[in-house]
Amino acid sequence: MKNLVSENQLLQALQWRYATKVFDANHKIPAATWAALQDALVLSPSSFGLQPYRFVVVNNPATRAQLMPHAWNQRQVVDASHFVVFAGRTAMTEAEIDRFIERIVAVRGAPRESLGAYRAMMTGHLLSDSGQARVPHWAARQAYIALGNLLTSAAILGVDTCPIEGFLPAEFDKILGLTAPGYAAVVCCALGYRSTDDKYAGLPKVRFPAADLVQTV
């Protein structure tokens, strides 16, 4: 398969993106662009393919205003075109695994009985006492994979982003009603378009050279 974007286009997009501090509140992401970004989230890889998370897109201005004080009053929460809260599962159940097995059967037409070993591997890894204890951390890591995919996808489409870890998850959980269905807020991302007032937009990107970060063995 040939490159869908060139090497230069990819690197230019990644050089262009930065953690946007000031969004233009009047510049909204077009519906078609947002639909593509939402699909990019859904297409993100995850361990076993289980997708142990939810992406809560907070459109309601009043809800965003409620969230902002619990995110160190960062204006990105209310000014960005779109605001996404990544919520990871706090526990896994046999029913969730079976739901995924049924999805494989429906999408790929695989015989259910052929997935027995795969199902046993998932239940053995995730439903034991030690496995359940690891689920929140495991789910959070999967959510971060989706976040990285969103950041890159947005950059390629010319959409600005700001990943946000500076918030109080318990307060977000309460406001968004995440606890009852078995989820917990992990990380957030504001998306939209940078304001001309953002002094960080023109600063050079600061990274260590590849020789310091990449080890080939």
Image: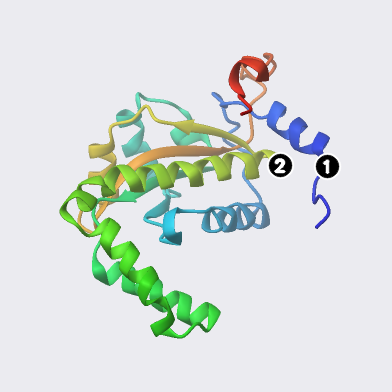
Residue assigned mark 2: 156
Q: CA–CA distance between discs 2 and 1?
A: 11 Å
Task: Identify which amino acid the numbered label 1 is placed on.
Answer: Ser
Residue assigned mark 1: 6
**Numbered disc total:** 2
SS under mark 2: helix
Relative to 52, does residue 163 appear above or below in the rendering?
above
Relative to 25, does residue 42 appear above or below in the rendering?
below
Q: Nearer the viewer, residue 216 or 166?
A: 216
Q: Is residue 85 visible?
A: no
Quarter of the image for residue 117 reads: bottom left
Task: Identify which amino acid the numbered label 2 is placed on.
Answer: Ile
Comes first in the chain, label 2 or label 1: 1
- Disc 1 crowd, CA 10 A, few/some/many (<14, 14-19, 20+): few
Q: Position of residue 13 (x, y in %)?
A: 73, 34
Q: Which one is closest to the eye, mark 2 or mark 1?
A: 1
Quarter of the image for residue 96 reads: bottom left
User: On the picture, is 149 further left or further right than 67?
Assistant: right
Residue drawn at x 80%, y 38% is 7
Per the rendering, the mark at residue 47 is none
Relative to 212, does residue 171 appear above or below in the rendering?
below
SS under mark 1: loop
Q: Split into 4 quadrants, where in the image is the C terminus?
A: top right
